[in-house]
Image: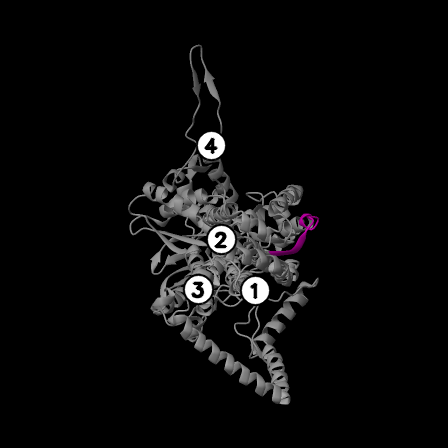
Amino acid sequence: MTLPELCVKRPVMTTLVMAGLLVFGLFAYRALPVSELPHVDFPTISVTSHLPGASPETMAASVARPLEAQFSTIAGVSAMTSTNAQGLSVITLQFDLDRPVDAAAQDVQSAISAATRQLPPEMPNPPSYRKVNPADFPIFYITLSSPTLPMSVVDAYGETILAQRLSMLDGVAQVSVYGSQKYAVRVQANPDFLAAKNIGIDELANALANGNVNLPMGTLNGTHQALTVEATGQLFDAAAFRPLIVAYRGGAPVRVQDVANVIDAVENDKVASWEGDTRAIILAIQRQPNTNTIEVVNRIQAVLPAFKAQIPASVDLHVLYDRSQTIRASVADVQFSLVLACALVVLVIFLFLRRLSATIIASLALPLSVIGTFSAMYLLGYSLDNLSLMALTLSVGFVIDDAIVMLENITRHIESGEKPYDAALKGSREIAFTILSMTVSLVAVFIPVLFMGGIVGRLLHEFAVTICVAILVSGVVSLTLTPMLCSRFMRGHEQQSQGRMFRAGEKVFNAMLAGYESTLSWCLRHRGVVMLAFAGTIAGTVYLYDVMPKTFLPSEDTDQIIAFTEGAEDISFAGMVRHQREVAEVVRQDPNVLTFMSTVGPSGSRATGNVGLLFIRLKPHKARALNADQIIQELRPQLDRITGIKVYMQNPPPIRVGGYLTKAQYQYTLQSLDLQELYEWAGRLTRKLQETPSFQDATNDLQIKSPQVNVEIERDRASALGVTADQIEIALGSAYGTRQVST
């Protein structure tokens, strides 16, 4: 007994099986995660090291090189890049697509431990690593501001409490803080006063460190009671540091306030951020590779209400940007297209079959095939994204074919006078192999896509599997449910009535058939013309393919624009802030902009002080006439008129391929063993690209023109005075490097 015969003779069994497929598919649909695209993230790990006061050359030689030597022994590393700046080194490791990022993280931790002995002992903390792609954009922005509280207090709520809580959430890779204003006590030494008291700056640093301690002191055990020993060694503000005694001169104590100005300040006063025109602390949250954006955002939003209840009413917390909103809107748009496609297919079937029962029987293959596919997607760990839903939309035209073929063959036997039950058995037996061959041949078309490699293969794998599963499910439905329904709900030929609508439709179809017959006859009489038209079509296709613009993924408007700003290499912080505010004012006046945040100073991969960033959130699509790319071209000439600063804007692409964030969407890497030769050719290549009309915003990340002061140590004179080179460099670092001497 064949499968169609079994289902025709067992209608209850067939109904229950199809109902189970429908129910499980609906449950799977509710459980499927939602994302923009399938998971195609490169396993990427970023290693950050800090050595305050060290030059970029020192960071490269003393910190980056020992770490890179250990990282090069890790299996599966496809690319390794490092950025070295003043006191900062960032090494980005990219691994092969098939390398689990958790296993790679363990290898990176082992490599850091192996390189620890080779690193400078002055490093305040060992290198830290994160599983994050620095080239990826944050998925969630939070701003904190206050009209009354100091920024250091606002920073304590944001960076110390909220950022740490968010970092603990599953799927959150990193919480970057823009405009960090962490509280600190600054001791501004007066060199004249120190010299007058014959006190070295190292003595001042030692006095500060020794006067602020928090050490364990044990317990005091008695006969009946044990007491914990505490001491007031910890100092908490500038007022407590001022009376500290540095030394005694002439029998009198010399206090910190006698030789230095001690103030309550912030740890880094060369960074600042704004939300619009309001000074703020910005938290930018990045997700881990291979995690779902919607799920991560949901976890973040679940934490915010409890945090809002804890902070004072004078601290304003705003969600500047939520990436999940555009993803949900995009997926909802594709879902609507899927439903619309199903409705149009059903309508076309009804117009041609002109019988309600036949239309319903054939159309049932659509929802069962689509909803049944959701079960397989859930079991395979897929998500509802643009590509998987597009696969289901395309499959609408495929999944209905099998049911129509089965229905037409059974209808043929009914019209010849057979009873619906006998016609279903006979017709399904005749057409079963044909439907099987149709299903297998359609699936075979997508087999090459299943075995594609690289990022394109990762991107299209879910698409191919989804459409193959939908086709297979439709084949099963056509071999089981369709013949069973035909045997129960199709009427015999003598019972079928031809109403007014049927007769009107028949006239239209006869007219179409006559038109096709006349057109076909003309083509058969003019074979040469038809062949010329065919050859012209082929030639036109080849020409259009050659001239059509090509890109990896189409530009998508996600209501956001990223703008990188860059001033002169020797620009001061105040000058950079002034130019940044000019750029912000131009952006604020644009009618397409809803809100934006602006930041100046080193942060993340932006390691120099002459750079800034603007994150621009646009109004919804319906509220503006221009898309993101058009808005960029509209803003570009206005921003170019601002002197002293360059602005590089980009519409963030759906997928970031690369190890770090750059000022442009395309980048070219130069490598050389000779550093001076590398510097020379980087400048030459950049100038040549800038002269080429096809390129826009050609630039590089080389920052070597900033003026610097070189201190040559006269070692003989230093030795005669009993001073070592180490003491000289420590003194210089303490004087000009904002050295941290105590916590």
For the point 50% across and 39% down, the residue is: 206
Amino acid, disc 3: Gln
Observer able to see residue 460: yes
Of residue 257 and residue 734, the one placed in the foreground of this image is: 734
Observer able to see residue 638: no
Camera-side mark, 3 or 1:
3
Q: Mark 3 touching mark 4, by CB under 8 A?
A: no
Q: Name the residue under label 3.
A: 496
Q: Mark 1 touching mark 4, by CB under 8 A?
A: no
Of residue 314 and residue 694, the one placed in the foreground of this image is: 694
Q: Distance between the residues labelled 3 and 1?
A: 78 Å
Q: Residues within 10 Å of mark 2 (few under 14, many from 20)?
A: many
Q: Mark 2 touching mark 4, by CB under 8 A?
A: no
Q: Name the residue under label 1.
A: 701
Camera-side mark, 3 or 4:
3
Image quadrant of residue 474? bottom right
Camera-side mark, 1 or 4:
1
Amino acid, disc 2: Ile
Q: Position of residue 69 (x, y in %)?
A: 69, 50
Q: Mark 1 touching mark 2, by CB under 8 A?
A: no
Q: Which numbered disc covers residue 580?
A: none
- Above-or-below relation of 61 to 687: above
Q: Mark 2 points at which residue?
A: 371
Q: Position of residue 450 (x, y in %)?
A: 64, 58
Q: Name the residue under label 4.
A: 214
Q: Which is nearer the N-term, disc 1 or disc 2?
A: 2
Which element carries disc 3, helix, strand or loop? loop
Region rendered in magenta: 70-82
Amino acid, disc 4: Asn
